[in-house]
Image (cartoon, rainbow, N blue to C red):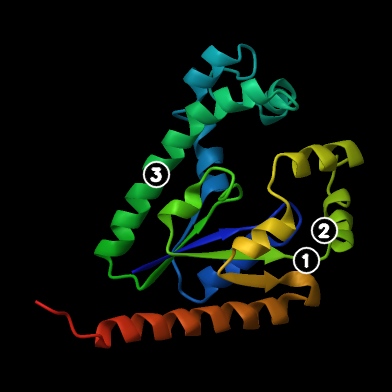
Amino acid sequence: MIVIGLTGSVGMGKSATARMFAEAGVPVHDADTAVHRLYEGEAVAPIEAAFPGVTDGHRVDREKLARRVVNDKAALRQLEAIVHPMVRREEELFLAKAQADGARFVLLDIPLLFETKADDRVDVVVVVSAPFALQRDRVLARPGMTEEKFTSLLAQQLPDAEKRKRADFVVDTSQGFDSARAQVRAILQQLEKTLNRSKSTPTLG
């Protein structure tokens, strides 16, 4: 089973690309979705203890929490120390199930894949990218987004150029969905060849 790590900076089209892998039959674990679940369950109590007033006792208010940790590296590290191990446990369960189901590929959709060193636990890395001007236009079109918030988000992420350098594959989303979907298919075809070659290699011993 090949574990694919998918990442990309804000506004690059990562979520849409993850859906394309899912449409191609690849099981996908979305770290952001896992966090959303945790913010309405297991993570509520420890986050409230660390940041009083950011929950109602049943769910985390993401806006309040964001205001508490934005531009505060120590607070952000504290939050990550609570949430990341929980997400990792969910990911391990997902991988175990996929392996048991006989999946040939799985995809881990991790926004901060390089920043959290999650690339150490995947076999290949796919980076979703687009020109900066397009990225900026996409992000600023989101409700409630400002130039200041956009700049803050970028500051938390490895630069796109560095991600591209460290990628095994790059999906360029600047040419629309059909182009991106074709790139996803090409990546899977290449990985299929890798799997087939490894199966045909004789084992010594």
Q: Earlier in the sequence, mark 2 or mark 3?
A: 3
Q: Amino acid at mark 1?
A: Ala
Which label was assigned to residue 130? Answer: 1
Q: Quadrant of residue 123?
A: bottom left
If the image is split into quadrants, where does the N terminus sit? Answer: bottom left
The label nearer to you, 1 versus 3, is 1
Is residue 132 positioned above or below 191 on the image?
above
- CB within 8 Å, label 1 to label 2: yes
Which element type, helix, strand or loop, lies under badge 3?
A: helix
- The residue positioned farthest toward the left in the image shown: 205
Which element type, helix, strand or loop, lies under badge 1?
A: loop
Foreground residue, 70 or 65?
70
Instruction: Check disc 2: other Cα within 10 Å, few if <14, some if 14-19, many if 20+.
Output: some
Distance (Cα) linking label 2 and label 3 = 30 Å
Residue at image position (83%, 65%) is 131
- CB within 8 Å, label 1 to label 3: no
If the image is split into quadrants, where does the C terminus sit? Answer: bottom left
Q: Position of residue 94 (x, y in %)?
A: 36, 53
Q: Position of residue 52 (x, y in %)?
A: 61, 11
Which element type, helix, strand or loop, lies under badge 2?
A: helix
Q: Earlier in the sequence, mark 1 or mark 2?
A: 1
Distance (Cα) linking label 1 and label 2 = 6 Å
Distance (Cα) linking label 1 and label 3 = 30 Å
Q: Amino acid at mark 3?
A: Glu
The label nearer to you, 2 versus 3, is 2
Q: Quadrant of residue 196?
A: bottom left
Foreground residue, 101 or 120?
120
Which label was assigned to residue 135? Answer: 2
Instruction: Check disc 3: other Cα within 10 Å, few if <14, some if 14-19, many if 20+.
Output: some
